[in-house]
Image: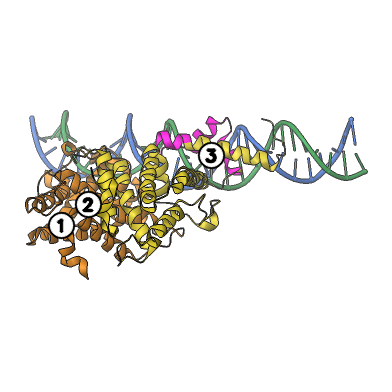
Chain colours: A orange, B yellow, C blue, D green
Amino acid sequence: MPPKPKTEAERQQLRTLIIDAARTLFVTKGIEAVTMREIAKRIDYSATSIYHHFADKEAVLRAILDTDMLALASSLRRILQMQDPVERLQALGQGYAEFALAYPNHYRLMFMADRIPCDPDKSNVQQNNAEQDAYFQLKTVVNDVYIAGRFRSELDHVDLIAQTIWAGIHGVCSLQISMAEDKWVNWSLLSERLQLMQAVLIRGLLKDANQIGALKR
Amino acid sequence: MPPKPKTEAERQQLRTLIIDAARTLFVTKGIEAVTMREIAKRIDYSATSIYHHFADKEAVLRAILDTDMLALASSLRRILQMQDPVERLQALGQGYAEFALAYPNHYRLMFMADRIPCDPDKSNVQQNNAEQDAYFQLKTVVNDVYIAGRFRSELDHVDLIAQTIWAGIHGVCSLQISMAEDKWVNWSLLSERLQLMQAVLIRGLLKDANQIGALKR
DNA sequence: GTCGTTAAATTAACAGTGTCAAGTAAATTT
DNA sequence: AAATTTACTTGACACTGTTAATTTAACGAC
């Protein structure tokens, strides 16, 4: 009930309060099932007050997306320290999948929803920043493997390679997220599906794939 | 305005009238943006009359799903005639992708949406019927390749192999459908992404992948 | 042929949604 | 002390999926 002019820091604080409340609800209740009134109630504000901080519901969503993209990149950051570029690539795939499956609803928002084609201009995340941009992280590692001469000789387009790896891992994760409950299919263990996809990608893309230790098991 | 007792055939006719109207709207306007009133208007009925033929909006959706699943299986059927099992497998992937990308909104409903875990008991599509069940078609072809001894020796679980192939193709298609508009990524040509994924799957799963003609060029 | 009965479809209404226009109250500025 | 600015709330609008009550038309029995 007490309105008073706020500093920019206080405004930002309230913004993240809203974002956090909204995120919790989105993640626990599912994407479309959460209302502005509900978000507001959770932080003891009225529904309309959110509109003083975000243009509309989609803007809230986009803000969540921004922080989630950062969270993903941040959770992958330590992997980039690894020595061998091929191991780095595999670990990146693994880390990506772990994020996707630990936060399936976040992942839905980020990579499976239909709205919001995310635009570098409208985002706070810095494109091509290795700390913030997960796609750039992948591209960098793919490039490292390429420089090391480990990819099959006919593969010379780093973006294409990166996108294929992404598609493979994303395929396993997104199918799991949207179809795992489906009785129609006799699903194998998720871990096995992921592992086979990793092996297939490595073998399909690398020159000397059979020498890679991780595939022996 | 004229109510009269209808034969079962007439009821069915109206059901498909509703389904068709709903499908058109879903496909052109996107999944969540279509209202019951809109569907009804399109066929000159009142909104509530739909509820005499379907329990709720989701039931309409599920019915659309059923017919779309049949359409997919039907569009893949001719491929099963091909001689060589490996060629058959590749053609199946290609045909699946073509369906997905020709009808992206149908595909969304079928494999990317969050609701509706589809249950053999609640569906009119017959599970494990080669005419109707696309997953069974895939599994059958995978099994043929397995019987022919073409998979790597350590791969002995047909469901796992099928699901990995599905995940790979689905990854390319779903990423295309939900992220192609995204300015963040410098997307390669869709056809190149699909082709590389096919090559990766073949090379990663088959014994003698380098002898496969389709990979040369 | 008329009379209930039954089915099909409609209208009216409800609770709930995102969002906007006005209004209110506290803090800052003048 | 008055005016202005800011933060927030209340009330309302148009719209959503869905249900209850109502109308309309066709059928079977006499």
Name the foreground residue: B208 vs B10: B208
- Identify which amino acid the numbered label 3 is placed on: Ile
Label 2: state its secondary structure.
Answer: helix
Picture quadrant of residue A185 = bottom left
Disc 3 from disc 2: Cα separation: 38 Å
**To which chain does the residue with label 1 belong?**
A
Question: Where residue D15 appears, x then y in whole percent?
Answer: 45, 34
Q: Which of labels 1 and 3 is toward the front?
A: 1
Q: How far from the left and from the top, in percent, is residue D24? A: 71, 31
Q: Answer whether labels 2 and 1 touch (C-beta < 8 Å).
A: yes
> Mark 3 belongs to which subunit?
B
Along the polypeptide, which appears first: circle 2 or circle 1? 1
Residue lying at 8% horizontally and 61% vertically, measured from the top left: A84
Residue identified by numbered label 2: A165
In front: A61, or A198? A198
Res C21 quadrant in image: top left
**Residues at marks 3 and 2 touching, judged by CB atoms closer than 8 Å:** no
Q: Mark 3 vs mark 2: same chain?
A: no
Report if residue A2 is visible in the image: no
Q: Nearer the viewer, mark 3 or mark 2?
A: 2
> Residue B68 vs residue B168: left or right?
right
Residue for badge 3 = B19
